[in-house]
Amino acid sequence: MTELLTATQMRAIEKAAIDGGEVTGLELMERAGAAVVEAIIEEWPQLDAGAPPDGGSAPRPAAAPRDISEKLKRAVVLCGPGNNGGDGFVVARLLEERGWAVEVFLYGDAVKLPTDAHTNYLRWSAMGAVSPLASSTIEERRVSQRADLLIDALFGIGLTRPVELPLVALTADPALGETHKTVAIDLPSGVCSDSGKELGEEGRGIWADLTVTFHAPKRGHTLADGPARCGRLLVKSIGLDSHDDLGAMSPPVLTAAPEVASLAKGQGAHKFTYGHALVLSGGAGRTGAARLAARGALRVGAGLVTLGVPSSAQMEVACQITAVMLQRVAGADVLAEILQDERINTLCLGPGLGQQRARDLVPVALAAKRATILDADALSAFADDPRQLFDLLHTQCVLTPHAGEFARLFPDIADRLAAPALKGPAFSKVDATREAARRAGCSVLFKGADTVIADPAGLCSVHAAVYARSAPWLATAGSGDVLAGFITGLLARGLSPHDAAATAAWLHVECALAFGAGLIAEDLPEELPKVLARRSS
């Protein structure tokens, strides 16, 4: 289980280790700096100017600065006014000891540095100079000229205000012959650690090629603009233990690959052991979305899946399905009668349903108190008065809005999320989804590359389709309907609403990654058996 920490939680873990005598602040700073250097050499071995002269792992003693012409690679380290700057001084010293030409800039007053950061400032000062960092030196590109490597140790996770420096000018400009790599320590400066949003004016902060953080990823590494700004993310251990007491609200966790055994079917079971899902469809010419959802539910392992269609769509659907069954559902009265069959344990309403049909059927479906997923039209149908829907919902429901649908159901929460971040910690998608789940009284899956799933008690997961799990091919019509179907099938099999949503989100992206370019929604259910087979081998 990978927790996504806030800045406050990370600082609490560090403080507990220091207060408990496990480690000193200076030792943590040294470990962090060493981890950054290690990550740089792992990522770009061609940049390494060589190990210490004796061939060992120990750094050589500090020596008088040598002429830049003697050295192979040039690093520029930007140090800020806090402990992130202290990490930067350690990186500068360790790179110097490896034979790099290192130039260090400090933003702020050295005498105001925290104690440990000031100690490392003095250690570096015995080896090399420290120049002041100002807007003019950045804009005139005096900082980044001739650099092979730029280290952003300005603010890290501690940033709570907009950055005044024009840091975006530090991005390598090939037109000027700049090809340097940018490495951020903890988080690119300008990004809020808790929300992933840029603080203040858009476009002023650092864009990193590599971000190195410690102990655990932070929320901002996976949410909003964070992943794009981080480049590639590496999480390095600095020897800290996990702590259970991280505040009243437990951290969200990254969704992980499901245990394939938990999705297998046992010997001696029969189809009703794995549930009977009913997917409600719209009328003629509008059945494709529901058929995609039904196919997804069946592929993920529901024992039976039935499509409930109005009479106008019966012939259209009958020509398109085989393993999925067909049931005429003309209106609310017929649905109520069908739901007398208690073997139907899961309902899916929304994909292609039509808003008027949704207004008729959703109240009946929710009154049956079965596991229910509401998507698309089943959400938009109540945009004029979301409270009507919330009064009907129960804890076995899952809502799956995209950003537009979320704004229609939770306009005030959406406004807070969309507002410019003027100070940190900023309101995040995790905060928004948790608040929405509490208001609705059920689980909410808020779609996006940073999909967030929360239940009314605050349990929260993030499925981040970013970095190595980026799946842009999912930007295709119908992919969300398949996701709804995956959740439906897992609910039918008995998973809790939160677990069904989190597992479905992971499988959905994994199918897209496995298929690759050219994906259309119909491919997702057909890719699922291959994904599960590869994971079980």
Image (cartoon, rainbow, N blue to C red):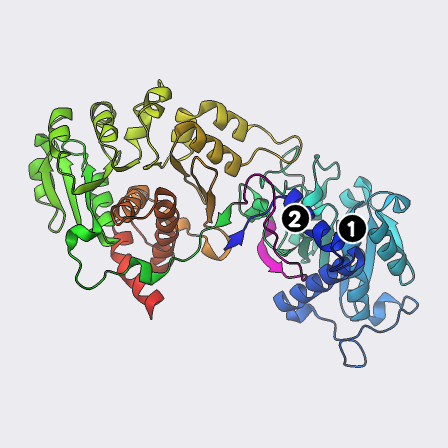
Q: CA distance from mark 2 to mark 1?
A: 17 Å
* Label whose residue precedes the other's in the sequence (2 or 1): 2
Hey, what amino acid is under mark 1? Answer: Gly
Tell me the number on the disc at residue 85: 1
**Element under disc 2:** helix
Q: Residue at x 19, y 64 (%)?
A: 267
Quarter of the picture holding the C terminus? bottom left
Q: In the rendered structure, does residue 433 fall within the stretch colored magenta?
A: no
Residue in front for this viewpoint, 7 or 17: 17
Chief secondary structure of the magenta span?
loop
Query: Quick one: label 1, few (<14), some, or many (20+) residues within 10 Å?
Result: many
Location of residue 62 with respect to 222 vertically, above or below: below
Q: Which residues are magenta?
A: 230-251
Residue 447 at x, y = what percent? 41, 40
Horizontal side of residue 262 vs 83, given as left or right: left
> Could you tell me if the residues under marks 2 and 1 are in contact, i.e. CB atoms within 8 Å?
no
Q: Residue at x 36, y 57 (%)?
A: 516
Horizontal side of residue 314 vs 272, given as left or right: left
In the rendered image, which quarter is residue 446 located in?
top left
User: Among all residues in the image, which is located at the extreme bottom?
Assistant: 54
Residue 20 at x, y = what percent? 74, 55
Residue 367 at x, y = what percent? 24, 28
Horizontal side of residue 75 vs 123, given as left or right: left
